[in-house]
Amino acid sequence: MAKPQDAAGSGRLVFIAILLFLFAVAVLQNTQPVMLKFLFWSVSMPRAILILISALFGLIFGIFLSVRAKKGKGAK
């Protein structure tokens, strides 16, 4: 018989898989080129690449804030 932790872990895995699938569909539907302008720099790239870069920056920033918050709680 499955333990409650195993069921919760598999449910979380299914949820993450569904989110990744939906993200992949959204990225694949946005292949049109866009012009990105930042200060004096501009570059043309597919919208999918821009979405992936933005998601990656968000992921890194979220992990950074999470680690920082955990360190702050441990110091008190």
Image (spheres, rainbow, N blue to C red):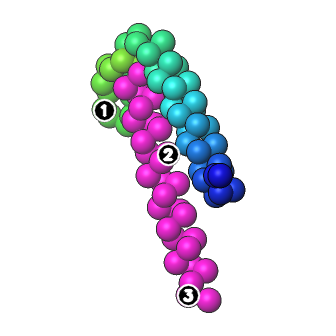
Magenta stretch in the rendered image: 48-76
- Closer to the camera in the image, 64 or 20: 20
Q: Earlier in the sequence, mark 2 or mark 1?
A: 1
Q: Quadrant of residue 50?
A: top left
Q: Nearer the viewer, mark 2 or mark 1?
A: 2
Residue 57: x and y in percent read: 43, 45
- Closer to the camera in the image, 4 or 76: 4
Answer whether labels 2 and 1 touch (C-beta < 8 Å): no
Q: Is residue 59 magenta?
A: yes
Is residue 12 shown above or below 38?
below
User: Viewed as shown, does residue 43 lie left or right of 8?
Assistant: left
Q: Which mark is residue 75?
A: 3
- The residue under the point 58% across, 37% down is 14
Q: Nearer the viewer, mark 3 or mark 1?
A: 3
Residue type at the position of mark 1 = Trp
Tag 3, which secondary structure?
helix
Q: Is residue 64 visible?
A: yes
How many numbered tags mark residues here? 3
Real-space CA distance between mark 3 and mark 2, rounded to the nearest whole angstrom = 26 Å
Residue 3: x and y in percent read: 65, 57
Quadrant where the C terminus sits is bottom right
Residue type at the position of mark 2 = Gly
- The residue under the point 50% across, 68% down is 67
Q: Earlier in the sequence, mark 3 or mark 2?
A: 2
Q: Which mark is residue 1?
A: none
Residue that badge 1 annotates? 41
Residue that badge 2 annotates? 58
Residue type at the position of mark 3 = Ala
Real-space CA distance between mark 2 and mark 1, rounded to the nearest whole angstrom = 21 Å
